Structure formats: C-alpha cells, structure tokens
Image (tube, rainbow, N blue to C red):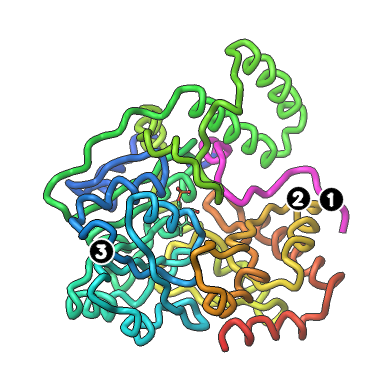
Amino acid sequence: MTPIGSVIPVYPTWAQFARLPAWHARWREWFPFNTGAGNWTFSGRVALYHGLPGLGLPGRSTILVPSYHQGVEIDALLAAGYRVRYYRVDGQLSIDLTDAEQQLDADVSALYVIHYFGFAQPLDPIRRFCEMHRLRLIEDCALALFSRHNGTWLGSVGDLALFSVYKTLPLPHGGFLVTKASQTTRPLPPAPFASTFAQGMDLLHQGLEASSWSQLETWWKRASRGVARMIRWNRNGTIASGGARWDPRLLEYGASPWIVPLMRLMDREVVVGRRRANYAHLAARLRGRASLPFPDLPAGTCPLFFPVMVPDKVAFQQELERLGVQSVNLWDAPHPTCPPALADEVAVWRRHCLELPIHQELSADQVDRVADAVLHVLGSSRSHVETQALTVAASA
Ligand SMILES: Cc1ncc(COP(=O)(O)O)c(C=O)c1O
C-alpha cells in the first residue's frame, strides 16, 4: 500500500462546511445548549473547574474518580481544591460500583464518571448509588456530546456535566458546562482573538489537507505564513484547547463570539447519523480481523472515535499516518496521583487502545480507506491472533 495524497483527519475540520451546511441550525434547542443553567467556556476542563463551586461540596473533600482517565480532568479537580480517590473500572471500562462503595468514607462528597468514547456508563445504578450515599454526581461528557442512553441525554442526570464541544464539532475551541445549581456560573471573558484565529487557521488548513486540493493547500500555507507575520502572531503566546498538559491560563476564558455563527452551520442529526453509520461500517470491515473492544454500537450512542487494540500503539499510529490516516493515542499515562496497582489494571488500555476517525465529515469511501490502512498495518506487523489476545486481556 502506498501513501495517499489526502489526509483523513481524526477530528472534523472546516471541510465539513462545503458538504454539510445547515446555515440556520436551531442549536440552542439541542441538549446541552438548551439548559437554563448552561454556559460556554474555553474547553471542557475550564467548564469543570468553574462548575465545581456550584455543587457546594465541602472544601478539601474527596471526589471519587476512575482509574482510567485523561489526566487534565484530575488536574482540574485538584486545582479547584478537592482531593481525589480512585475507583476501579471493569474490563469494558464500566464503573465498578462495589469497589466505589469500598472507597467511601465521611470525606467523600462526589462521584466522577467518564462516558468513554461516547458510550454510556450505567446511569440508573449510578444515580441510585449517589442518592443512597448522598453524593453529588459529576458526568464527564468530554467525549460524549449528543449521546443518549435509553432516551436520556448523557450529561442530563448528573449535578454537573462538562462537554468538550470542539472535539465533536469543528470549532476552534469550546467547552460547555451544565449544572443543576440554581445559579448560573458567571460568564467568562471571551477567548483571546489571536488564539481563536490560530485555531481557526488550523481547522481550515486541516480541511484543505483532507480535501486533496494540494495546490490550494500550498497556496494557503504561504498565505497563512504571511498573515501570521502581518499580525505578529506568536503562537507561543496563544492558548490552545485540548492536550494533556495543564495550562492554568485557560481558566480565565470563555468561548469566542465566533462560536455562535459557527454553531449555526452545524446539523446535529447529520453529526449523529454519520458518526453512527461510519462506526458501524468500520466495525463491519474490521470485525474478526482486528481486536475491537466495542464492536457494537448501542442505540443512541454518538461515538467520538472507533477504538481498536493494536500491538505497538506508537509505531502503529505512525504507520497509519504514513498512509494518510490520522488516529488518536488517547491517554497513554495515568495521573501521578493514581496508585500504581490500580493504574496497572488499565495498563492494557493505555498501551494498546488506539482511536480511529469515524466523524461526520467522512464518506463511506474514506472509512474504507481507514479500514484498508488498519488491515494493511496489522498484516505487516504482528498476527491477528496476538492482537485478539489484547481484547481478552482488556476485558479480563
Ligand atoms: C475524559 C476527559 N475529560 C476532560 C477533558 C478535558 O477537555 P478539554 O480538552 O476540552 O479541556 C478531556 C480532554 O481530552 C477528557 O478526555
């Protein structure tokens, strides 16, 4: 297989607007944007940080958090002045409520759950658990915008929910905070123009890379260098959404005013429908040929990525990139506060789980390209039998 001209981006880009214009989307009617006590922030971690005071938790109290986590959500809880204690997740990354119960003591004030890849945690037992033990529930929906479970929107059950909107939709940045607190959080000052501009340029550039208009892309690269010089745009001075590094400067900011006109271009039904169709298509292509921890898509799930277990994640990702397919190496390291024995239990996920693109911008042909690239790299690396063992190990 030879490298291919256009790139398949792992996140949606502004190429979407050429194909999926909604123009007048009534996005304020969609959950979570229709909630009275909702607020835009710069990103998901900023939403979490600013939502916490509304929960009224005792200062320095303990929040139960999962052993499989990104790390910045833990940083946000610590920065807001809380302690954390870890609970186990099972082989399918569902909360182990028996273990969570064993972690309880008088200091524990809240339970933090993460809906991984857009797949729901078992919300009914979780809600009962929180009621029984008088805990506040925090739903981390950073990876789960527009996902539902049994008709309930993820993020609508917890006392606080955070979303990382720019991961699902092509926005330069944008987190959203939903809280059951009676008072809305105070709006934050808009993100700096230079940061929004830089991130907007990235979305446009990635869109051009994805569209195989190589001439246009070359022109754009030249033009953007010129524009950057013109406005003395120094990227070191800008703030960026995403990433595993904790940057306290982000906490100062809400979303840019650009977000509102951009949201009008989105189409929720297309986003959910395409993501689901692309996920099912990729699952059908890879089933039985690659190690798939979540081959089936429950009704209502809006998946962010397609997780696959691969032998050597970093090398695999590089090989895919060479074939023009981007992927995400999610969460390769635990937070330093996670006890090593617990961290070890999810080490298989951290070492082997790679996330593939299935977003709304991709056509069935592009999903086929993703599948072909994965099968090619698998064929030229280790045997399928070996990768199959990874799923067994992850779900043990
Ligand atoms: C589970 C989880 N929670 C919170 C966040 C923070 O979201 P953001 O990057 O929008 O600040 C992330 C980011 O990847 C995440 O994966």
Dot placed on the residue nearer the N-terminal end, 1 or 2: 1
Q: Where are the magenta residues, as a range? A: 1-18
Dot 2 amino acid type: Gly
Residue at x 42%, y 49% (from the top left corner):
164
Look at the numbered disc 2 and give the secondary structure of its residue.
loop
Indicate the quadrant where residue 352 lies.
Answer: bottom right
Q: CA distance from mark 2 to mark 3?
A: 39 Å
Q: Position of residue 163 (x, y in %)?
A: 38, 52
Where, quadrant-wise, is the N terminus in this rendering? bottom right
Q: CA distance from mark 1 to mark 3?
A: 45 Å
Q: Are marks 1 and 2 in contact (CB under 8 Å)?
A: yes
Q: Residue 324: give its label.
A: 2
Residue at the disc numbered 3: 158
Q: Nearer the viewer, residue 70 or 211?
A: 70
**Residue at mark 3: C-beta within 8 A of ligand 1:** no
Residue at x 22%, y 70% (from the top left corner):
135
Dot 1 amino acid type: Pro
Q: Residue 3: give its label.
A: 1
* Horizontal side, residue 236 vs residue 161: left or right: right
Can you tell which of label 1 and label 3 is closer to the viewer? 3
Q: CA distance from mark 1 to mark 2?
A: 6 Å
* Horizontal side, residue 25 vs residue 207: left or right: left
Q: Position of residue 230 (x, y in %)?
A: 62, 10
